[in-house]
Amino acid sequence: MIQRIQSVYLFVAIVLTLCLFCFPYVEVLNGEIAYATTTCHLSPVAVGLSKAVMAPIAIVTCLAVVICFITLFTFRNRTRQMKLTKISIYLQFLIFATMIAYIIGLSKALCADNLQFNLCFPMIFPIVNIILLVLAHRGIKKDDDLVKSADRLR
């Protein structure tokens, strides 16, 4: 059912993942120029970096949103919902790893001595999503165990 607590966890995970498209997760100060990085673009575009560089993290983030959304509405099939939740957890790990990789890559691409990195609040969204998805998985597992125990009693 939609009104279960794990549905709330999944919905919040979807919202937080969508926020990665809107808000920058790192700001890099290179002298007077400030670069803001979201999952879609780097603003302003740094010398030597194209917009195609940001495609992998955008694709993984879109995939995570779609899989979480599908997971939210597959409440009738709990085993599939648990599998999709595990896949979503792995995708959140991948998003976090690519965020860190982009920060390291951006520092190497700019090649300046006076770089200053400011990690923004959305940097913790994948970690919060992992926690929410683990809680959702536990709730789904608890419901599945409850249904199986009720089937044994019949």
Image (cartoon, helix red, strand yellow):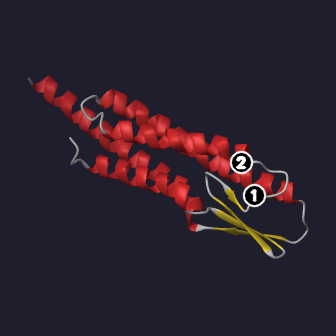
Whole-percent x, y for residue 120 in the image:
61, 67
Q: Residue at x 31, y 52 (%)?
A: 8
Q: Where is mark 1, residue-wise?
A: 45
User: Considering depth in this image, is 39 or 138 the residue closer to the camera?
Assistant: 39
Q: Estimate how packed mark 2 is, as few (under 14), some (14 to 19) or many (20 or more) residues with alpha carbons within 10 Å.
A: few
Residue 91 percent location from the top left of the image: 54, 40
Residue at x 41% of width, y 41% of height:
68
Q: For residue 51, which numbered disc appears in the image?
A: 2
Asked if marks 1 and 2 touch (Cβ < 8 Å), the reply is: yes
**Along the horizontal axis of the image, is 147 left or right of 77?**
left
Q: Residue at x 35, y 50 (%)?
A: 11
Which of marks 2 and 1 precedes in the sequence?
1
Q: Is residue 132 above or below residue 35?
A: above
Kind of residue indicated by mark 2: Lys
Residue 131 screen position, x and y as percent: 46, 52
Residue furthest out toward the bottom: 32
Per the rendering, the mark at residue 97 is none
Residue type indicated by callout 1: Val
Gap in Å between the C-alphas at discs 1 and 2? 8 Å
